[in-house]
Image (spheres, rainbow, N blue to C red):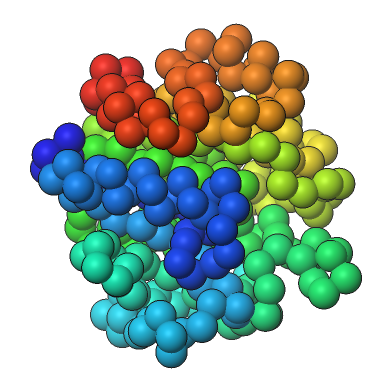
Amino acid sequence: MKDKRILYVSSEVVPYLAENEVSLMSYDVPKMINDQGGQIRIFMPRYGNINERRHQLHEVIRLSGMNLVVNDLDMPLIIKVASIPKERIQVYFIDNDEYFKRKATFADEEGVMYPDNDERAIFFAKGVVETVKKLNWVPDIIHVHGWMAAMLPVYMKHFYKNEALFSDTKIVTSVYSQSFDGTLDAEMINKVKFDGVPDDAIADLEVPNFENIMKATVLHSDAVIIAADNLSSSLTKFIESSGKPFLPFTAKGAFAEAYTNFYKNEVL
């Protein structure tokens, strides 16, 4: 994978957030490609529970200052950056006071999901693409991890479909086990349609629960990785019948070779 450019877009990444299946793989996979001589960037949201001082985040003024439209509202984009100690891996943080200042990731102290999580996901997807455009950094692969990043493939295939920068970029999505119950805002589908995404492309978002969001993501990806050994049978069958190249679940000790071969043989 030497000199291949891979953009990792994730809901969560260690060491900035607690360890779980998404945050750990969102660190381990980029590290593996970095060790192989690949060029990588990682993007994640700058949640309010990330300690900026401890992790030495700083704002990148030349990348910040743009306004992104979400559901007809202008939302300022702030970009921060940090480096993972000892790894020479740069992590870019998508920030906005309205969406990401609160002191938790997806839910409040009572465990209730934030009502604007759908808008946060849309803002995150747009923020990543607009920042990569400003960097003028052309990824060979965009690898998506976690449901907060799940709108990126949808927006890449529709809202940004005419961006020449990404004409040869392939999108891989890792699908993890269910990470929230219930649904996001019922108006989510209309907020995505506001950006010119056709109804039939996002019909699954009529009921924006975890499984349907991941189905929409899979449909807009070029390849899929089953990243959990306890993925629901219905979502597993959906992936297997999607016609997309897919990698079955691979245990942590064996993922490096499997992921590298999948990138080389099924994606690039």
Q: Quadrant of the N terminus?
A: top left
Above or below, 38 relative to 116: above
Name the quadrant containing residue 219.
top right
Pinpoint residue 32: horizontal percent, then vertical percent.
28, 44
What residue appears at the point 62 percent right and 47 percent down from the top-left corner?
Answer: 147
Q: Is residue 53 left or right of residue 197?
A: left
Front position in the image: 166 or 209: 209
Question: Residue 215 vs residue 85: left or right?
Answer: right
Is 223 or 197 nearer to us in this picture?
223
Could you say which quadrant of the image residue 245 lies in?
top left
Image coordinates for residue 137, horizontal then vertical, percent: 21, 54
Q: Quadrant of residue 201?
A: top right
Q: Measuring 68% from the left and 29% from the top, which residue is drawn there?
A: 230
Res 164 visible: no
Quarter of the image that includes the C terminus? top left
Q: Position of residue 224 (x, y in %)?
A: 48, 26
Q: Is residue 154 above or below residue 95?
A: above
Q: Is residue 24 left or right of residue 21?
A: left
Residue shown at the point (27%, 80%) measured from the top left = 62
What residue is drawn where x is 79% and y is 37%?
206
